[in-house]
Image: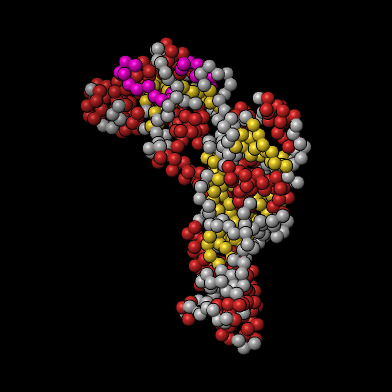
Amino acid sequence: MNAVLEDKINSLPSSPGIYQFLNEKGKVIYVGKAKNLRNRVRSYFKGKVDSPKTEILVSKIFDFQLIVTDSEIEALVLENNLIKEFKPRYNINLKDDKSFPYIRVTNEMFPQIFPTRNIVKDGSKYFGPYTDVKNMKNSLRILNKLFKIRSCKLDITQEAIDKKKFKVCLDYHIKKCEGPCEGLVTQAHYNGMVNQVIKVLRGKTDELISELKSQMESASTKYEFEKAAELRDRIDQLQVYSSKQKIVSNDLEDRDVISAAFEGKDAAATILNIRSGKLVGKRQFNLSIEENEELDQIYSAIIKFYYNEYVEVPQEIILEIEPEDSETLIEWLNTKAFKKCKFVIPQRQSDTKSLMLMCKHNAEFQLKEIQLQKMKKEGNVPFVLSALQRDLRLKKLPRLIECFDNSNLQGTDAVASMVVFVDGKPKKSLYRKFIIKTVEGPDDFASMKEIITRRYNRVKEEKLPVPDLIMVDGGKGQLSSAVEALDNLSIKNYEIIGLAKRLEEVFLPGESEAQSIPKTSSSLKLLQHVRDEAHRFAITFHRERRSKRTITSELLEIKGIGEKVAQKLLTKFSLEEIKITDEKKLADVIGGAKAKLIYNYYHNL
């Protein structure tokens, strides 16, 4: 810690506010908020560092700046704005540089409704953001058919109407607009239509349909049949629109479901908007995070990003875990909500749990899309290989992986397998089977040493390429045996790991503790897939050997038949076929005398 930092830390205020950490070039690398600036900032330098990310961050802090606020809520809002402005390296950031569009309802006498990416704080209402622009345009197209909202950008005021400044356009003549520019529709009637559009945008379509039905009945009672017919047609179209929205819960609650999926420095967030029990919208964001980011911090960032703008806050926000600073977040959300908001963390099987899982699947799919795009940029190399290289700190991309497994039954019929994966996929033509030759009894360590020696002695003699990653099924014992075999062969510059079944622990040579790989990482899933394939191949070979030995034993019970004759016969026929095959066909394989013995044995002659 330099002298400048030391002095500043000793004179920190105990007020709420935000702090900005700067590197030696004066660039903001992290923005945070605090209820008590003195306690929070001091914890970075004088407390216990709780994560690798924080450790790296602290090592790069050269100076810091403070902004004192009146409350923690005010600090939260300011923190969010500064993160958006500076995009600091060690904060979670929105990955998308472009801003997402909103639907704007202008604040004027006869409001306009149109899409926009620019937020103007003039009292206009905003709905969104819409990450699916096609879906937003489709919604607007439907609303323009249903409601006679003006499409012009005229500045319609009472003075302009009185002076007859504007003339009606084609929209009026084709009944797409009711002519507010000439005062042919009252402000109250027009704004009533705008409020109906807002109800649809808020997902309250069914509520609007009920209101329109009441208006239609009222119009019929008053013999206003033309108006009633118009309302009927509007109801029919709204019902079609509403029927396309999926019913996902029966309690008719308003809620958002938020889920995140992440790996490495990539994170994807999906937000499902449910209004009156219907799924009315889906928002998706890509985030840039640091490795080993905590999940509660990711959820906290998503909530701040999403609800910071003109987004309706529902009664419930469903999450898989409690976000960081949840109490402050709820307090902030309630300043923006129509009704009191709360976080819901589903604990048992229910509608909300099912919604959470559905949202999670969407986020995971979105993350795979991000990884696919990365893969294309990297020359069609699967992202999982980059993840594996990162997680195991390998020197190069593990495009060629060879994995070994042993199989025996109490030491009998001991065999082993080698499976090969190229670019993350099995290459079955390169698989190999081994019969253990030098080991007596069940000794996995010695068996592993034998097959590694045999395989890589051949690699050495034939000058074949050493794989980018050698993998053994087992823990420290099997790994040590494999390393010893490779060292005895003077194989250099190899990468090797062991994957133990019980806790899915990854072991590296020379390290007593298992390597920590996140359970959510695709790299661990690839290692499990490779290991399981090697195990399957070894078990299958072991069963074949054991079955063949059993069959051979039965033939050896025939007086005059030895092991060589039995093996020769079994290369041509199965045991069942031998039992029913005629003597002449058997004689073609093993000669007449031996064929006669076998034929007579199975036909009781």
Give coordinates of residue 465: x percent, y percent: 34, 22
Residue 183 coordinates in the image, percent (x, y): 58, 80
The extreme bottom residue here reads: 223
Q: Residue 64 appears in which quarter of the rendering?
A: top right
Which residue is most to the top? 488
Which segment did they paint magenta?
A: 460-483
Is 256 magenta? The answer is no
Task: Give yes or no for residue 478 being in the magenta stretch.
Answer: yes
Q: Nearer the viewer, residue 89 or 443?
A: 89
The residue located at (50%, 60%) in the rendering is 135
At 63% from the left and 74% from the top, the residue drawn is 192
- Image point 46% across, 16% down: which residue? 483
Find residue 101 and report its horizontal and vertical position in percent.
Answer: 53, 57
- Snapshot quadrant of residue 111: bottom right
Query: What residue appears at the point 55 percent right and 45 percent down from the top-left corner?
Result: 94
For the C terminus, the quadrant is top left
In the image, 29: left or right of 403?
Answer: right
Image: 446 above or below 588: above
Left or right: 282 with respect to 579? Answer: right
Name the one closer to the observer, 181 or 550.
181
> Residue 488, how many percent across, how many down?
42, 11
